[in-house]
Each structure stands twice: as structure tokens, then as C-alpha cells.
């Protein structure tokens, strides 16, 4: 009988700990790279070329790091809470995609097509496009 109570206490503790951890992760604020110095400053075409040429080396150099990318905007895709800017890379098969997350208080004015700008964000990898998240306009 005593073993049942101990087992029940252990299971209850594990479940409550899991709920507390999930609540913590849900309430955690969204990452902001605005105050972080970029590890690299690179042109969009050069970044895309690095991933296209040797993906494993580019992953070691750029993935998970805050980088500043400069290039010409080819497309702007926006919703109520997110936006993506696509940069020209010189390769019609791919681009550099910079993802923005908006808040109700802060919704920046996005540049139009054919505008040359710099964006800072966290590089998350390469599928057909190089993707940056948590971006801010420079």
C-alpha cells in the first residue's frame, strides 16, 4: 500500500513539473536580435552562394548565429503578425528569406520591391532558400 502512494507521488510530481515547464516555455518572450552584434556582415548573394556551394561548411559558419544581410528586396509577403522579405541572390532557384514577427505595439514599415536594405537576423539554415528568423531592419 505504501508503494502505491510513493508511486502516485512520483507520477504526480513528474506531471506537475511537465506542466510547469510547458507553461514557462509558453510564456517565454520572443527572441530579439535588435541589441545583438552580428557575427557576420554579408551580401545576400554571397550568403546564398556559400550555402549552395558547400552547405556543411556554411552551416558551421552561419547556423544559429546573428548575421547582417544586405541585398535587394525581390518580394514582400505580409500578414497581420508576420512578414517575409526575399532578397535577390542571382539564382532564380532560391533566395534569402528574412522572417519578421510583429507585435500589436510594434509593426515596422517594410521596404518595397527593388529596395536595397540591410537586415539583421538569426540564420536557421538552408533548404532551397537561406532562412533568417527574428529579423530586424537595420
Image: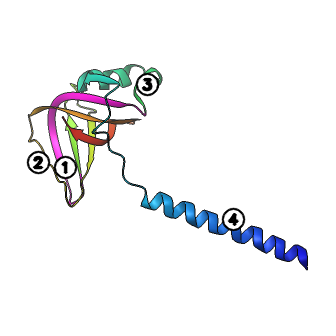
Dot in front, 1 or 4: 4
What is the crowding at mark 1: few (fewer than 14 residues within 10 Å), some, or many (at least 20)? few
Above or below, 59 against 29 in this view is above
Name the residue tied to disc 3.
Answer: 55
Q: Which residues are magenta?
A: 64-82
Q: Horizontal and vertical percent for residue 12?
A: 70, 72
Q: Horizontal and vertical percent for residue 90?
A: 21, 25
Q: Which label belongs to residue 14?
A: 4
Q: Which comes sooner in the sequence, label 1 or label 4?
A: 4
Q: Which comes sooner in the sequence, label 3 or label 4?
A: 4
Name the residue tied to disc 1.
Answer: 77
Q: CA distance from mark 1 to mark 3?
A: 26 Å
Residue drawn at 43 percent across, 25 percent down? 55
Q: CA distance from mark 1 to mark 2?
A: 13 Å
Q: Secondary structure at mark 3?
A: helix
Dot in front, 1 or 2: 2
Residue 96 versus residue 19: which sits nearer the camera?
A: 19
Amino acid at each position: 500500500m505504501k508503494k502505491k502512494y510513493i508511486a502516485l507521488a512520483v507520477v504526480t510530481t513528474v506531471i506537475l513539473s511537465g506542466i510547469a515547464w510547458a507553461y514557462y516555455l509558453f510564456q517565454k518572450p520572443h527572441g530579439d536580435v535588435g541589441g545583438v552584434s552580428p557575427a557576420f556582415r554579408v551580401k545576400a548573394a554571397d550568403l546564398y552562394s556559400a550555402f549552395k556551394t558547400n552547405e556543411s561548411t556554411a552551416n558551421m559558419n552561419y547556423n544559429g548565429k546573428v548575421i547582417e544581410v544586405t541585398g535587394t528586396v525581390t518580394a514582400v509577403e505580409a500578414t497581420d503578425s508576420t512578414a517575409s522579405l526575399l532578397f535577390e541572390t542571382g539564382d532564380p532557384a532560391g533566395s534569402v528569406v528574412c522572417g519578421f514577427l510583429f507585435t500589436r505595439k510594434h509593426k515596422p514599415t517594410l521596404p518595397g520591391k527593388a529596395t536595397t536594405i540591410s537586415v539583421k537576423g538569426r540564420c536557421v539554415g538552408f533548404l532551397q532558400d537561406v532562412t533568417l528568423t527574428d529579423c530586424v531592419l537595420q
